[in-house]
Image (tube, rainbow, N blue to C red):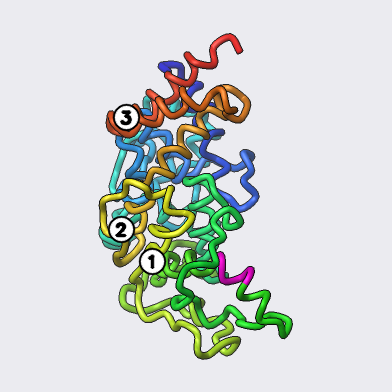
Amino acid sequence: MKDVNFYNVTLKNFAAPWTNENRSVFVPLNDYIATVIGLIRDDEPFNQLLSRDITYVGRNGVVAAPPAANNNDHYAQLESNNINLRDELVPTQQSLINNIPSSATAGVITSRAAAEAFFVAGTNRAMFRFTLLNHLCNDMEQMHDTSLSPDRIRQDVSRSPGGDSRLYLNSCIGCHTGMDPMAQAFAYYDYDEVNGMSLQYTPGVVQAKYFNNDLNFPQGYRTPDDHWDNYWRKGQNSYLFIDSTGPSSGDGAQSLGAELGNSAGFAACQVKKVFRAVCLREPDLPDNGKVNQIIATFRGTGYRMKQVFADTAVYCMGQ
């Protein structure tokens, strides 16, 4: 893992799909990808990926464009100039670049690249869905659970889509009961694609997008703040949080990121993604013992991703 190509190519391609809705590897280097590369290179605790006030940037003077909240020029130049990311990336506080309080940062969730992809327009549910998909390896279909309380489902969700309430009770409710209480953590965030081309944070003021189509069901939940609750600590999805010891609720994206990053589901997902990248296949039943061992080592030794890559490479060698 001393080879520069592990950082410039392997890790860049490893993280690139997490930064866009198409999950394409063919995207420019950006702050999200650079932060993943830096955390792995430095053996930093990877469970802080979704909660820490950190961004990796090029060393001062290595390219002409400085890191900026409103453009990707710095990272585009790092890539176009073929800068050695193994040697030239350095950590800094994301809050200083994005001009938001440190307490409002949430690792790659509040990176410029993620904001541009997942906070733009919409209702901010996209940020939650793609964080879940990329870092807990589950999409909403797999998380569908109609047994939980629907008390936090927003007003824009019709309770009788197409005039049939059964569709809501048997389908819509299964995703929104878990998603809406947690996506509330993003209530103060938006991406300004018209003026600033940057992440916007409005503490104490819920973004207007949370009230889109509020007449669909006026009796539904009207978002008052950024307080979130993880209803999935119970029910069929509780296995993802089976040994979570932190609070199951909080305020804002940073504490939600910590809840997700410290979950059993997050650790298992990282190992499965590395297995897929290194072994070029999905883990199968005979691999479960080794995969579980790597997960346990990952969680027990400081969430060091380089060790996951090394252990997985040894296991798949010669296959």
The residue tagged 2 is 255
- Asked whether the beta carbons under mark 2 and mark 1 sit within 8 Å of each other, the answer is yes
Q: Nearer the viewer, residue 229 or 225?
A: 229
**In this view, the mark in front (1 or 3):** 1
Where 303 falls versus 217 (above or below)?
Answer: above
Label 1, label 3: how far apart the Cα atoms are: 29 Å
The residue tagged 3 is 42
The residue tagged 1 is 185
Where 310 falls versus 267 (above or below)?
Answer: above
Q: Nearer the viewer, residue 145 or 119?
A: 145
Which comes before the other along the chain, label 1 or label 3? 3
Q: Is residue 254 magenta?
A: no
State the residue at coordinates (71%, 82%): 164
Q: Secondary structure at mark 3?
A: loop
Label 3 sits on what residue type? Asp
Q: Is residue 207 visible?
A: yes
Label 2, label 1: how far apart the Cα atoms are: 8 Å
Residues drawn in magenta: 170-174
